[in-house]
Structure formats: C-alpha cells, structure tokens
Amino acid sequence: QVQLVESGGGLVQPGGSLRLSCAASRSILSINVMGWYRQAPGKERELVAVITFGGSTNYADSVKGRFTISRDTAKNTVYLQMNSLKPEDTAVYYCKCDYGLGSRFHDWGQGTQVTVSS
C-alpha cells in the first residue's frame, strides 16, 4: 500500500494560482502512474493530469495550457501547478497512484479542497 498526502488547496480568486503537492510514502520511481483527479459537488470524479514512470504527461482538455503536473523524485512528491484558475475548477482534488504488474493496485489520497471564487 502507498500512503498519499495532499496539501496546498485553499481559496483563490479567479485568475489566480495554486500549487498542490502529493507526498508518497515510498519512491515514486516504483509507481507506474501518478495523477490528479477532481470531484465537484454533484459530479463524478474526473481525471485532471497524470505523469508516468517515464515522465510522460497527459491532461484533461479543460486544463491544458493552464495546469502543469511535475514531480520531484528525491522528495517522492508530485505537484500540480494550477494557473489562470476559473470558478469551474472548484472541486476536491485527489492524488492517485497506480502500481504493480499491469498497474493492478491503486491508492488514493484524502483530497484537498480548491475553491475559486471572488
């Protein structure tokens, strides 16, 4: 099992920025994929951005050009830099990891609230 701890959420005005962090309990180089998901009230959880073991990234169309996923392997931490935030970005943001043969194991963090409002 991998423990994931998110931090960095909060209240920000439209157009502002936040950086989320996800600290893993073991080396992220042993994890196939790490990603950020979000869930807004009354909506299903959706993928925001992922980064693979090899460093490849992928983003939801709604955040392309505004959000950047990155990692610090020395700190076993994945980041989500969020710029030009919009009210529709308001959600609980979750960190997820996929590991093991065929990425058959999954763990989630507890989530961090991001609220974009004036």
Image (tube, rainbow, N blue to C red):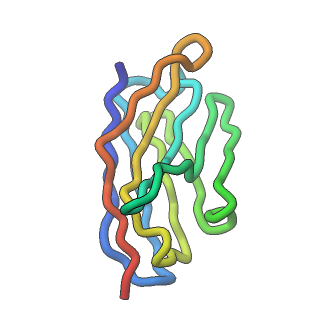
| Left or right: 49, with 57 as reference point | left
Residue found at the far top of this picture: 101
Residue plotted at (69% across, 60% down): 61
Which sits in the foreground, 92 or 67? Answer: 92
Q: Quadrant of the N terminus?
A: top left
Q: Is residue 62 above or below residue 103?
A: below
Q: Is residue 14 above or below residue 37?
A: below
Residue plotted at (59% across, 43% down): 50
Residue found at the far front of this picture: 42
Residue 8 sits in quarter: bottom left
Residue plotted at (51% across, 26% down): 98
Residue 101 sits in quarter: top right
Q: Is residue 52 above or below residue 91?
A: above
Q: Quadrant of the C terminus?
A: bottom left
Residue 39 sits in quarter: bottom left
Residue 97 percent coordinates (x, y): 47, 31
Residue 89 percent coordinates (x, y): 48, 68
- For the image, the number of numbered tags is 0
| Left or right: 24, with 28 as reference point | left
Q: Is residue 42 above or below residue 83?
A: above
Residue 75 percent coordinates (x, y): 41, 37
Residue 59 percent coordinates (x, y): 65, 52
